[in-house]
Amino acid sequence: MSDKETISHDAAILAKALPFMQCYEGRTVVIKYGGHAMGDAGLAEAFARDVALLKQSGVNPVVVHGGGPQIGAMLHRMGIPSKFEEGLRVTDRATVEIVEMVLSGSINKQIVALINAQGERAVGLSGKDGNLVFARKARKTSIDPDSNIERIVDLGFVGEPEQVDRAVLDQLTDSGVIPVIAPVAPGRDGATYNINADTFSGAIAAALGAERLLFLTDVPGVLDKEGKLIEELSVKEAETLIGDGTISGGMIPKVETCLEALNKGVGGVVIVNGRVAHAVLIELFTDYGAGTLIVP
C-alpha cells in the first residue's frame, strides 16, 4: 500500500469512528479489566493505549481490575492454601492481607504505570480511599446435593458493595485523571473485605451513571446453544437464556451483575473478549462490536 493509500485508509477509519467518539464524548465508561489480557504483556500495553485514547477522545474512563491468578500465585508462595466456595475465594484474615497487598499494590500500580506511559495521568486507589466504597459481609447459601438442605456458606472476609460515594471519582475525572480501582473495601465493622471485581465494577458503574460498563473476559461473550456469539441481548432475553440453561456456570453471575447494573441506570453493558487486541476501541468506536451487548 502506498503512502497516499495508507493516508486515505487511515482517514476512512477515522471518519467511521468519529460519530462513535462524539456519542461517548463527556460520558463515563467503566472497564472491568482482568483475565487473559492482564497476564499478556502485549495485550496489557494495548489495553493501556485504548484507555489513554478514550481519555484523549473526550471519554471519562474508569478502570476496575481483578487479579485472581496473581493472588493465587502469591498465596502459593506464602504457603497459604486456596479454598473456593460457590466460585468465590474463602478469605480468612491472613488471606485478605495478601489480597489487599496484591490488588492494591503490585497489580494496581502496574496498570497505573502502563496508562501513564501512554501520556495520560492515572491514579490508583481502592474502595478504602476517600470512603469510595463501604462493604458488608457477603451472605451465600448452597444446596447440599445429597440431603437437598440449604446451608450457609461462610466466605470469611468476602464482601459485597453496600454504599458507593462517587465524590472522589468525580474530583479525579474533573481534574483529567483516570481512576484505577482495586476491589478492596472497608466494612462498617472495621474489617477489610475482598470483593468480586465484576460485582465491584457494577456498583461503581451504577453510582456513576455510566454510559457503558465493559467486562473484559477470557471468552468471546455470551454464546448460544450452538456455541455462536450472541451480539446483543435485551434484559428479558438474557433472563430467558439463564432460565433455559443457555447461560450457565461462571457466566451466570457475570450476566446477573450486568442486569443489576442496567436496572440501576447504566446505559449498556458489554461482555468483551479481552484476548482481542484493542477490544475496547473496537467495541466503542466501530459498528462491529467485540462481544455481547446487553441493553435495557
Image (cartoon, rainbow, N blue to C red):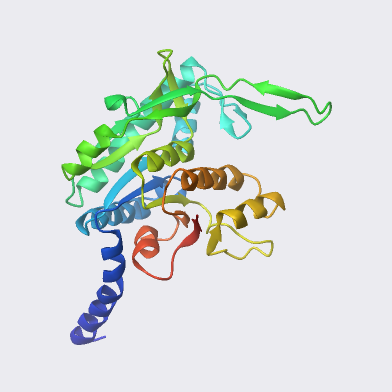
Q: Quadrant of residue 50?
A: bottom left
Residue 107, position as x, y percentages in the image:
35, 36
Q: Residue at x 43, y 15 (%)?
A: 191
Residue 239, position as x, y percentages in the image:
63, 51
Q: Quadrant of the N terminus?
A: bottom left
Q: Residue at x 15, y 42 (%)?
A: 175
Q: Quadrant of residue 184?
A: top left
Please, is residue 264 above or below residue 150 in the view? Answer: below
Q: Is residue 66 visible?
A: no
Left or right placement of residue 200 versus residue 223 in this view = left
Q: Is residue 203 visible?
A: yes
Q: Nearer the viewer, residue 24 or 47?
A: 24
Left or right placement of residue 249 versus residue 268 in this view = right
Residue 278, position as x, y percentages in the image:
36, 60
Q: Residue at x 30, y 53 (%)?
A: 45
Please, is residue 210 above or below residue 237 in the view? Answer: above
Please, is residue 248 above or below residue 149 in the view? Answer: below
Give the total of numbered labels: 0
Query: Quick one: which residue is furthest to the right in this view?
Result: 147
Query: Quick one: which residue is furthest to the top in this view?
Result: 189
Q: Residue at x 55, y 58 (%)?
A: 234
Q: Nearer the viewer, residue 117 or 123?
A: 123
Q: Quadrant of residue 276?
A: bottom left
